[in-house]
Amino acid sequence: MARKCGCFERRLSRLFYVYGRFLARHPLVILFVALAVAAVASCGVVFLQFESNSEDLFTPDVSRARDERTKIQGLFPTDFDNFSPARVTQLNQRIVQVITMARDGGNVLREAVINEAFNLRETIVTTTVVNENGTVVTFDDLCAQVGGGCPVNPVLQWIMLARQYNQSEVKVPYPSVTFTTGGLTQTVSLEFHLGGVQERDGFAESAKALAFFVYLRHEPEDMNELSGVWEDAVADVLDGFESQELSVVYFTSDSIDEAQQEMAVDVMSYFSATFIILIVFAVATCMMKDWVLSKPWLASSGAFSAVLAILSCIGILSTAGVALNQVAASMPFLIVGIGLDDTFIMLAAWRKTNPFSSVEERMGEALSEAAVSITITTATDFLAFCAGSITPLPAVRVFCLCAGIAVLCDFFFQLTFFGAIMVLTGRREAANRHCYFCRKVLSREESPSAWYSLFCAGGYTRRDSLDSATSETKPVDHIVMTFFRDSFAPVVTHPFSLMVICVVYVTYLLVAIYGCCVLQEGLEMKNLAEEGSVTNQFFEANDEYFIQYGPMVSVMVIQKLEYWDTNIQRDVQELVLDFEASPYSRGPDSTEFWLRSFIAFSQDMGVNITGGDTFNSLLRNAFLPSPQFSRFQEDIVFDDWGDIIASRLLIGTMQTPSTENQGNLMINLREIADNNNQNLTVEVYAPTFTVLEQFLIILPNTLQNLVIATLAMLLVSLLLIPNPVVSVVVTLCVISIETGVVGFMSHWGVNLDGISMINIILCIGFSVDFSAHISYSFVTQSRRVPARERAAYSLYSLGYPILQSAVSTILGISALFFTRSYIFHVFAKVLFLVMTFGLVHGLLFLPALLTVLGLCGESAVVRNPVATMDEEAEEKKTTESGNLEALMHIRESNV
C-alpha cells in the first residue's frame, strides 16, 4: 500500500529533480520570466478598489433580513416629514448620535454641565454646508422632522421650557416626559436620552450621560449625499469642541465604514516595519561562521519573492474587479510568513547536498526533496482557502480568495525567482566567493591572518576538493541542525520523555476541549472601529449607559384582513400577546399597535366599529389624521378600494448581554412569527437583524469549512506522503492543532465571528505545514532504520527550518499586536496560537508519536535518479554499525 501511495510522490520528486537541473542551467532566463510575470500581474493594482461597507461585508449573501427590509421599505416607507425613530428601517440611517458626560464623572444634570450641553446643541444645529450650486444648506433643511420640528434632545427641551416659566429649580421627570403643544399631548421616553440615572419620586435626581439624536433625511439620493456632507461637517465640529465641563463622543452613519478604510491604510505602515524585521531575522538565521556558506542575499530574496506574490495577487484580483477590504489587508502578513517558510525549507535541502557536486546536481537534489514538501503545504493551504471561499460572508470569501491566489503566486515565485537566485548563490559558493561582496576568498585553513579569518575567510580548501573524489565529504552543518540531532532528538525520543510528553499532551487537549465548550459567538460593532477612537469610545459609553433596552422590532402582518371582524381582531391581538410573552419582550407598555389604540379611541368616541364602512371611515377620517395618532399612518397599507392589505406593530425588546443572545432574540421572534397559531402571514424585522444574521451561519459554516479543508488535506497527504498511516497521523495532528487553537482562542477572549472564522480556516493550511514536513522526512527513510533514528534525522533535517518559519511568522504578525484594530488583533492572536501549537506538534508531539508507532512500512525513499551506489546494502551496513552520522550522510546523498 505504501509503495502505491508513494508512486505519485516519486514521480513528482523526479519531475522537480529534472526541473532543478534545468533551472541551474538557465537561471537568468527563469529570473527574467519571473520578473516579467510579476510586472504584468502587478499592473492591475491601478484598478484597486476598496469595500468598506460593514453591512455588505459581514452579512450573508442570502439574507432573510435583507428580504424583510426590502418588504418593509416597500410597504412602509419612512416619512421624513413625520419621522418616528422607532420606525427606522435602515441600518445606515443618516444620523449623528452624541453622548456627553461630565468630565469629572459626576451628574450631567448640574447647571454648569447643562449650560455646556446647550452650547453643544447650538453648535450642532447651526452647522451648515454648501451644495454644488453654492447654496447654503442648514440643519433644518436636512433634518427628519418630528412633530413639525427637529428636536435633538427632549431633556434639554424640557429644561428650556421650565426656564421659560422661571422655575427656580428644574426637575426632569423620569422615565418619561409629557409635552403639551397646541392642545396636543405627547409623551416621550427619556430612557434613551439619559443614562446612569438615579431616580427618586418620578424624577431624575442625577444622571451620568446625556444623549443627542440628530436624524437626517437619506432620500432621495441627492439629499442622502448632502446629509453625508453635513455629517462630516458636524464630526469636524465635534472633534474641535472644547469644554471644561463636558466630554463628548459621537457616532455617525459613516463612522464604521470610515474606520475600516483608515485601519486598512494604517496597517500598511506596520507591514513595512514587519518586512524589515523579517529580512533582518532571515539574514541573521542564514548566517554562519563561514563567509562563503552564509547566504544573506538569498534570505532577503525569499522575502522579496513573497512581496512579488502579494503584488501579483492584488493586481490579478483588481483586474478581475474584486474589491478588497480591511480583512484582506492582513493577507500580506500571512504570505510573507508562508514565503519565508518555503525559503527555509529550500535552504535546508540545499545544505544537505554534497558541497562538491555541481550546482546543477545540487539544485536537482535540493528541489527533489524540498519542492515536494512545499507542494504539500501549498496544496493544503490553497484547498483550505478554497473551502473558505464558498462561505456566504463576503469579508471571509474575499480574504480566502485573495489568500488562495497569493499562495499559488508564492509557490510560482519560489520555484522561479527564488530558485534562480538560489542557483546564482550556488555558483558564488562553488567559486568560493564572499557572501556579501562576491569576491573570491581563501578558506579558514588558508587564511593569512586572524582578521582575514574573522571577516573574509570561508568555503573549502583545494585539498577538500581533491579529497572529495576519494572519500565521503560531509557538508558543513548549521549549529542548530546539529543541536536538534545530537541533543534535542535523543531527549524527545527517550522512553521517560515519551511518558512526560504523553501527560503534557493530554493536559493540553483537555484544556483545549474545555475552551471549545465555552467559546462565545458574536461580533460587536465597537470592534470594527479602532481601539481608543471616538467611535470605539462611543460604543463603550453606549454599552455602559444605554444598553438596557434592545431595538424596536417591526412585526408585519402581510395579508388582506377584515380588521373590523371581531374574530380577526381576536386573532391579531393573540398574536401580539404571543410576542409580548417572549422572554426578550419588554411587555405591553413598550408595544405600539395601531389596532389596540384604535379600539380604545373608538370606545372613547362611542362608535361601534364592527362594520367595515364605519371602521374604515373612523380610522381614515378621524383616528389617523389626529396629531396624537398620526405616527400610525406609516403602519397601515390600504389598497385602491380602501381595504387594509398590510399592517405593522412595534414590539419593544430587552437588551441582551451578548451578541450571541441578540441573535437568539432574533431567532425567538422569528419562530413566533413563523409558527403563529392564527395562520397569519407574519414577518419580523429590525435594522440590526442584518448584522445578527451572521450568527445563524458562523458555527455551521466554520464546521463545514473545517471538514472540507481537513478532507482535502488528507487527500493531498495520501497523494504526496508515501505512507497512508502517516497521512492519517498528519490529519490527526491538524485536528489536534485546530482544537487547541479554537479552545485557547476562547481562553484568550476571542469570540467566534466572521473575523476569527477566517483565521480558523487559514489554520488548516498552517497546521499541516510543520507536521507534513516532519512526517515526509520520517517516512522517506528506509524501514530498516530504527524509529528513534528516523525521528532524529527528521529533526536534524527540518527542525531548524521549522523553528525559523515559526519564529519568522510570529515576528511577522507581532507588529499587529501594536495596532488598535480588533480585526488585526484577532489575526495576530490566532496565528500566534497556530504557530506555537504547530511548532510544539511538529518538534515534540509528532516525533514522539512516530517513535512510539515505530513505523515499519516498506521503504519509500526519494531516490537520486543518477545515483550508482547500492543504497540498500550501504544502509544495512551502516545500521548494523550503529553509525548514525554515516547513515545521515547516506540519506543526504540520496534524498
Image (spheres, grey):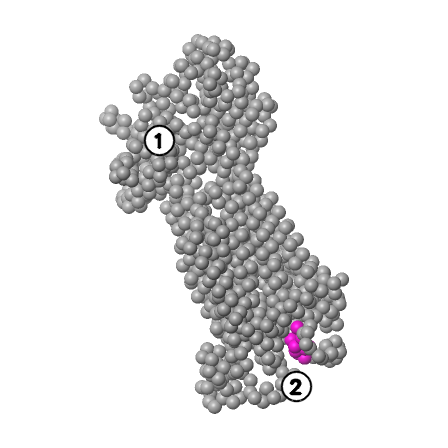
Of helix, strand and loop, which mostly describes the magenta segment?
helix
- Residue 662: numbered disc: none
**Three-letter amino acid code at the position of disc 1:** Ala
Tag 1–tag 2 contact (CB < 8 Å): no
Secondary structure of residue under mark 1: loop
Mark 2 crowd level (few <14, some 14–19, many ≥20, 10 Å Cα): few
Residue 266 spot, x, y in % from top left: 40, 55
**Three-letter amino acid code at the position of disc 2:** Ser
Vertical position of residue 533 compared to residue 98: above or below: below
Q: Which residue is mark 2?
A: 471
**Can the viewer see residue 589 in this picture?**
no
The magenta stretch is: 885-895
Mark 1 crowd level (few <14, some 14–19, many ≥20, 10 Å Cα): many
Q: Residue at x 27, y 27 (%)?
A: 161
Secondary structure of residue under mark 2: loop
Query: Closer to the camera, 229 or 839?
Result: 229
Q: Residue at x 47, y 11 (%)?
A: 613
Q: Residue at x 69, y 68 (%)?
A: 780
Q: Quadrant of residue 779?
A: bottom right
Residue 516 spot, x, y in % from top left: 59, 49
Q: Which residue is mark 1?
A: 144
Indicate yes or no whether the magenta region holds residue 886. Answer: yes
Q: Residue at x 34, y 19 (%)?
A: 184
Vertical position of residue 822 compared to residue 440: above or below: above
Q: CA distance from mark 1 to mark 2?
A: 91 Å
Residue 822 spot, x, y in % from top left: 46, 50
